[in-house]
Image (cartoon, rainbow, N blue to C red):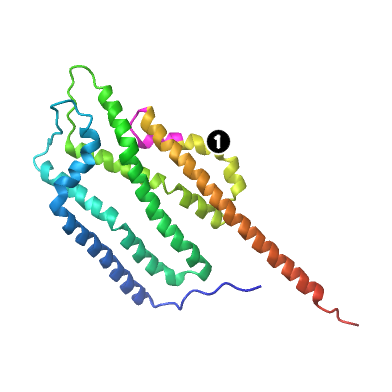
Amino acid sequence: MSTPQQPDTTMPLVAHLTELRTRLLRCVVSILVIFASLFYFAQDIYALVSAPLRAYLPEGATMIATGVASPFLTPFKLTMVVSLFLSMPVILQQIWGFIAPGLYKHEKRIAIPLLISSVILFYAGMAFAYFVVFPIMFGFFASVTPQGVEMMTDIGQYLDFVLTLFFAFGVAFEIPIATFLLVWMGIVDVATLRKSRPYVVVGCFFVGMVLTPPDIFSQTLLAIPMWFLFEVGVLFGGIIQKEREAKAAEESESDTNNDDQTPSVQS
């Protein structure tokens, strides 16, 4: 039976710390460079992010700033967060460069697609929240505004609200990666995940209830994609588990054939 290829030669602790510092500096520099490029457009970026809410404000109503420095700090904060999100490929690349020498060859083959998929899924979750969830949710809020109350949202509170939803949907869309890793690492098998499907469905709606505002629309719009993405993870986990079982069967058959072909020792 062939043994897996060993990781690269070990490095001294000081060399590891030096490399870690270098890669952290690269991550910080990438964030600052993107931030410097976007800061001039900070007001436009906030206008873009707030568009789903402003579309449902009553005629003549606007968003308000209750803090003295909110007109400056809120777009500033948003631009910094956007810079962090946009620099995520660079950050993951640096993380990969740091841990790759310690991985086996077969681990490297699976890690690269997982890193790329995780970035794409996180961005997809944010896009789903912006283009699908926000219009439905803000339309619902505007429709239930009590008579005599004018809907005028503070820009700082709105930013905190949408960033929470962006993060929630971005993390929720990582469920296929988490499910696949659980199967790949042997922590749980596909059969157990399939038996746990009713509990997963209930858990998805519970998470949707906790992470989203108290309306059935946003809860359902988070829970259903989470359930669907869980099924996708189970599907790919089943594929990798079948490949692993087939490989184990081939190795077992090969060992059996080698034992049968070994001549017996004559007394």
Q: Which residue is mark 1?
A: 198
The residue lying toward the viewer, choosing from 217 and 161, is 217
**Picture coordinates of residue 163 (x, y %)?**
28, 43
User: Can you tell which quarter of the image residue 212 is in?
Assistant: top left
| Residue at x-position 55% and y-position 52% | 237
* Picture quarter with the N terminus: bottom right
**Picture coordinates of residue 33 (x, y %)?**
20, 62
**Picture coordinates of residue 260 (x, y %)?**
81, 72
* Picture quarter with the C terminus: bottom right
Which range of residues does the magenta coloring cover?
A: 205-215
Secondary structure mostly seen in magenta is: helix
User: Residue 206 colored magenta?
Assistant: yes
Extreme residue toward the right, this view: 267
**Picture coordinates of residue 56 (x, y %)?**
23, 29
Q: Amino acid at mark 1?
A: Pro
Q: Secondary structure at mark 1?
A: helix
Residue 168 visible in image: no
Q: In screen coordinates, is 241 left or right of 212?
A: right
Relative to 224, residue 29 above or below: below
> Badge 1 local density, few (<14 within 10 Å), some, or many (20+)?
few
| Residue at x-position 35% and y-position 28% | 215
Relative to 43, residue 13 above or below: below
User: Residue 77 colored magenta?
Assistant: no
The residue lying toward the viewer, choosing from 58 and 249, is 58
Extreme residue toward the bottom, this view: 267
Q: In screen coordinates, is 149 left or right of 173?
A: left
Q: In screen coordinates, is 224 left or right of 235?
A: left
| Residue at x-position 65% and y-position 58% | 245
Residue 3 visible in image: yes
